[in-house]
Amino acid sequence: NRLARGGPVLAPGPRDLPLQYVDVRDLADWVLGALERELSGPYNLASPPGHTTMGGLLEACAAVTGGTAELRWTAPETVLAAGIEPWGQLPVWTPPGSDLHDALQSADVSRALATGLVCRPVGDTAADTWAWLRTLGGTAPQRPDRPPVGLDPETEAKVLAADAPGGGVSDTTP
């Protein structure tokens, strides 16, 4: 939803921050195949290192939602200093070098890849997720016992204003 509204968008940096995730359809395909082949044991099921970056993900999302968002790359230190919670207020983002980032984004997935895990391109996941969200009116279902996911507009505007060119470290270069 946020990228679809367009305008300046806080993009937590760095742009080349590696991400590992798995599209639920790829996960389901692998699990069903593993059941058929009677595989057992531990597997890390996520995309391989280098599959995408924070920039690749946000740029794909911006493209499928209309492409009018201006990604304003903001240093991790600026994001954290604003009190923004990694993962919750900025879904998927974790600060580089943090224990959380290392735990979530540096998995050895070689065993899963060797047994058939195939991860679709980030653009396909973004496009299909956006199409699904539009069938729901643009808002993903939320559990009532959880805080809303995403950054509130006031916090985003405050960080963007403080980090504007000449006063911060944003990089709006494509």
Image (cartoon, rainbow, N blue to C red):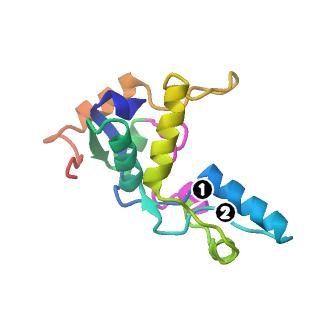
Give the left or right position of residue 24, taking residue 9 as reference.
right
Q: Is residue 110 visible?
A: yes
Indicate the amino acid at tag 1.
Answer: Val
- What element does badge 1 sit on? loop
Q: Position of residue 168 (x, y in %)?
A: 22, 43
Is 76 a magenta residue?
A: no
- Quadrant where the N terminus sits is top left
Give whichever of 110, 117 is nearer the camera: 117
Tally the marks. Answer: 2
Q: Position of residue 6 (x, y in %)?
A: 29, 31
Q: Could you tell me if the residues under marks 1 and 2 are in contact, i.e. CB atoms within 8 Å?
A: yes
Give whichever of 67, 159 is nearer the camera: 67
Q: Within 10 angstroms of label 2, few (less than 14), some, or many (20 or more) residues?
A: many
Q: Position of residue 110 (x, y in %)?
A: 63, 76
- What element does badge 2 sit on? loop
Residue for point 83% across, 66% down: 36
Is 90 a magenta residue?
A: yes
Give whichever of 27, 158 is nearer the camera: 27
- Highlighted range, magenta: 83-104
Q: Is residue 85 visible?
A: no
Q: Within 10 angstroms of label 1, few (less than 14), some, or many (20 or more) residues?
A: some
The residue where tag 1 is placed is: 22
